[in-house]
Amino acid sequence: IAARGDYPEASLDLAVTLGRAGRVDESIRTYRALVAAHPRYVNARFNLAVALDQAGRSADARQELVQALEIDPDHVASRLRIARISWR
């Protein structure tokens, strides 16, 4: 299975599935490729941030959340997650 740049939803689904299967590094790589191909895809950035946070990389997660909020300042999930990271 490979991510396809021309169908971002499939790549997002693949990354989610990899994460749920415990293949976190592969999930993060898939999210990164997706964000590189579609830099304004806020849900991909948010999910990348969640995966990074779960992998213990909270500084990287925070950076992705900041970028997501630059694209969409009203993205509630990003606001909540960044607050959660900052609270720790």
Image (tube, helix red, strand yellow):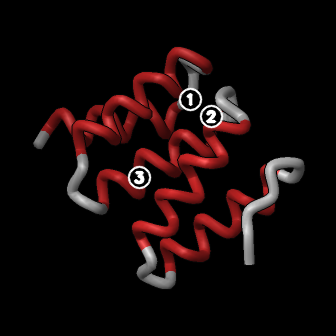
| Residue at 35 percent of width and 52 percent of height | 52
Q: For this view, does 38 lie left or right of residue 87?
A: right
CA gap, disc 3 and disc 2: 12 Å
Q: Which residue is mark 2?
A: 42
Residue 75: image tag: 1
Within 10 angstroms of label 2, few (less than 14), some, or many (20 or more) residues?
A: many
The disc, 1 or 3, on the residue closer to the chain's N-terminal end is 3
On the image, the x and y values in percent for residue 30 come to: 59, 58
Amino acid marked by disc 3: Val
On the image, the x and y values in percent for residue 49 come to: 42, 45
On the image, the x and y values in percent for residue 32 come to: 54, 47
Residue 50: image tag: 3
Within 10 angstroms of label 1, few (less than 14), some, or many (20 or more) residues?
A: some
The disc, 1 or 2, on the residue closer to the chain's N-terminal end is 2
Residue 46: image tag: none
Rendered position, 88 above or below 13: above
Question: Residue 36 sits in which quadrant?
Answer: top right
* Image quarter (top left, top right, bottom left or bottom right) of the N terminus: bottom right
Rendered position, 6 above or below 79: below
